[in-house]
Image: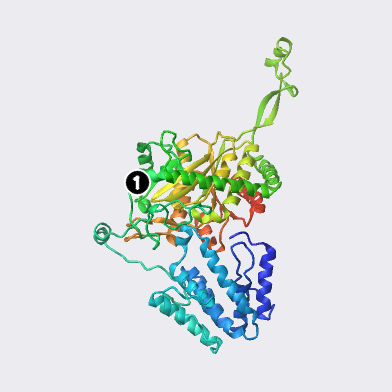
Amino acid sequence: MSKVTEDERKRAENLIWTAAGSYDFSPDFCSFNEDGSADVYMNIVIGLEHKWLGERTDKLLKEAAESRRAAILTDTLWLGIESYVYAKEVAVRPVLEELRRKHAGEYFERLKKLNRQQWMAENKQLLDQQSIRWSRVLGNEKRIYAPDRKALAAALELSPSLSADEVADKLMSILVRFFAFKGGEKERPRSVKLTAGQAWILKHIFKTEHRHTDTVMMKNSFDGSLTEGGAASKDDKHSSTHQSGDRAYIEACFGRSLYNDEELKRIESRLCVGVHRACRVFVTDGRISEDKAMSQDSVKIRNDSARQELLNRRYMQSEGSLPISMVRRLSSRLEVVLAELRQNIAVNAAAGRLNASRSWRMHVLNDPDVFTKNKAERELPIDVTVLLDASASRMQVQEQLAAEVWILAEALKRCHLSSQVLSFRSLRGYTILEHMKGFKDNDTSRLFGFYAAGWNRDGLGLRLAADELLRANNGRKHILIVLTDASPDDSERIAAGGKYPLGTAYEGAAAAEDAAEAVSEIRKNGILIYGLFLGRTDNIENLHRIYGKDQVRIHDISQFAKACGELFVKAVNEL
């Protein structure tokens, strides 16, 4: 979703208050379109919910929002609420019929724009319910659904003759019947305690892990098919079987490996353990090997990424002088913050305190620098690494991310701070780390080549980036800034064993916990790590779980310089 402006937020609230006929409450929910504009119809529905239903339904919505399945439960409840308040009000508000049909049409237009990774990220059960509802609104019910999906859809069509209490009872019964929901408490994952022998049997005899054969898809891909390149399965993201040639595909798409096979094996022996036991790693500089023929896959990736680079540059141009202004503001802010760390060093100068041992140079060599004065050191023994989450979940903000990382790199260069930029994503069981800009590279233009694709196994991506820093072992201080949406999600499951005897999907609380453990390990190794968050509000809990207090949130690019300044204040205080 694009950024939500304060004007649009106020517009959403006004729609809600007007529909509710009351202005003395603060809405718990607001609805916005993908472009950040207020969703007129759904905000009216939210206002009508306040008018007709009240406390019991509000309480149920809150309980659902606190559940580990918050997205599907709350969206399902709103489908039921929408059917009820529409039927209650359409007779006195005939415009609702037109608004409802428009909303239904926009829903299907949005589905047409989803790429493959986004399709896989959608919950299939919720997608079916939304499609059933809005197809009916448009009078287009051609698709056949499973009996349980049709039963849920029928249950969500609530009669306007029900009272507010009866609606709350009906909605609760729907959650209990179809989702085994327990109201009044947060749902917790069920655990099974097994002996070591039982766990071994389940792990080695019963095959519990599956892998998805992913292909790289981009927002602006020239080929919009969902199963490009022969990739099987429109089913659950973890359900298709492994195909051969993964390493060749990774190299064809993302570039040559910076390490030989033996070096990669040593890295994997350190990092691909525990929950990452079934994973591999790959480190690249993004450049295709000249001695290898360009495959169809790699040609397509190059074409799509070149188009995205053009979009990134156009975005920068559309912002006018703002990026350059932000570079100046950020570099000035950093100079003030870093001044505390810079030490005075003695340098030769044309004025100052006479250095007797150099005085002869003025007469013999005509060298005026025979004096000594104190000057703050120009460079600090600090390396700054910027790490970008380059997964498909960042597709909607990749132009903004490219601009932000360019601003930060340029500001660091002006402050004479050594910096590098890395990005990470995962695909086909590989976590791929790309070096986009090196410490000795002053050319920041390559950063506009950033694009989003694949998954993000944050726990392994963070550890791999830190491993790169520690391998240098140059005695310098390391600051690692992660541009993140705090939503780790990978198609490769967590390996069976330990806390997960049967393994589990790498997503949700389990993935966030692994990422938090990675951050803790990185800090213990002396690296200062901070999260710079641009993402959905429902990932805030993950953000705090992973980075603790060492994070800052931004909503749009105008806040970027200030946020980076806050992070460096934290870093200097620790240093």
The x and y percentages for residue 561 are 65, 49
Name above or below for residue 425 compared with residue 100.
above
The x and y percentages for residue 261 are 36, 38
Task: Count every numbered label the image shows and give the total.
Answer: 1
According to the image, what is the colour scheme of the structure?
A: rainbow
Residue 336 in view in this figure: yes
Name above or below for residue 62 compared with residue 417.
below
Question: Which residue reaches farthest right?
Answer: 351
Q: Secondary structure at mark 1?
A: loop
Residues 20 and 551: in front is 20
Left or right side of 145 for 32: right
The x and y percentages for residue 309 are 57, 45
The residue under label 1 is which amino acid type? Gly
Residue 180 in view in this figure: no
Q: Quadrant of the N terminus?
A: bottom right
Left or right side of 38 for 500: left
Name above or below for residue 185 compared with residue 432.
below
Task: State the residue position of label 1.
Answer: 245
The x and y percentages for residue 366 are 73, 13
Q: Residue at x 64, y 65 (%)?
A: 37
Residues 193 and 554: in front is 554
Residues 286 and 107: in front is 107
The part of the image, by quadrant, that contains residue 192 is bottom left
Q: Residue at x 63, y 77 (%)?
A: 47
Question: Which residue reaches farthest top?
Answer: 364
Mark 1: few/some/many CA within 10 Å (<14, 14-19, 20+): few
